[in-house]
Amino acid sequence: MASNNVMRQTYRELSDADRVNMKTVKDLGAELHAFVEGLGNSRETSLAKTKIEEAVMWAVKHIT
């Protein structure tokens, strides 16, 4: 994959390890997101959930 493929017009095929890693990142992110959601509603928990979603997005982007 070219390093300048910022918009990802083409995708590379994921290996089995990549798929496992991506699922693990998403599962752990969902678990933490649910835990934070259970703490109650506030600006801080809202920000925390957004940051968790962002962290998962960036980790998945790295994997893919």
Image: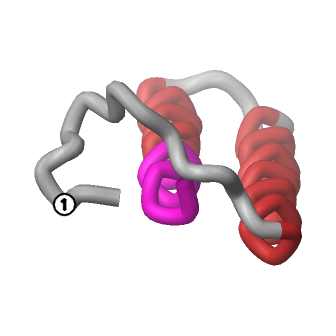
Front residue (pair 42, 58)? 58
Q: Residue furthest left?
A: 4
Front residue (pair 27, 19)? 19
Spot occupied by residue 48 in the image (x, y as percentages of width and height): 50, 44
In the rendered image, which quarter contains the N terminus?
Answer: bottom left
Under tag 1, what secondary structure?
Answer: loop
Q: Indicate the quadrant where residue 3 lies.
A: bottom left
Q: How many marks?
A: 1
Front residue (pair 44, 1)? 1
The residue at the point 73 percent across, 31 percent down is: 40
Relative placement, left or right, of 26 versus 16 is left
| Residue underneath mark 1 | 3
The residue at the point 66 percent across, 52 percent down is: 13
Spot occupied by residue 57 in the image (x, y as percentages of width and height): 51, 43
Front residue (pair 61, 30)? 61
Dot 1 amino acid type: Ser
Can residue 63 be spotted in the picture? yes
Q: Main secondary structure of the magenta part?
A: helix
Q: Indicate the quadrant where residue 8 lies.
A: top left
Say above or below: 62 vs 54.
Answer: below
Bounds of the magenta segment: 55-64
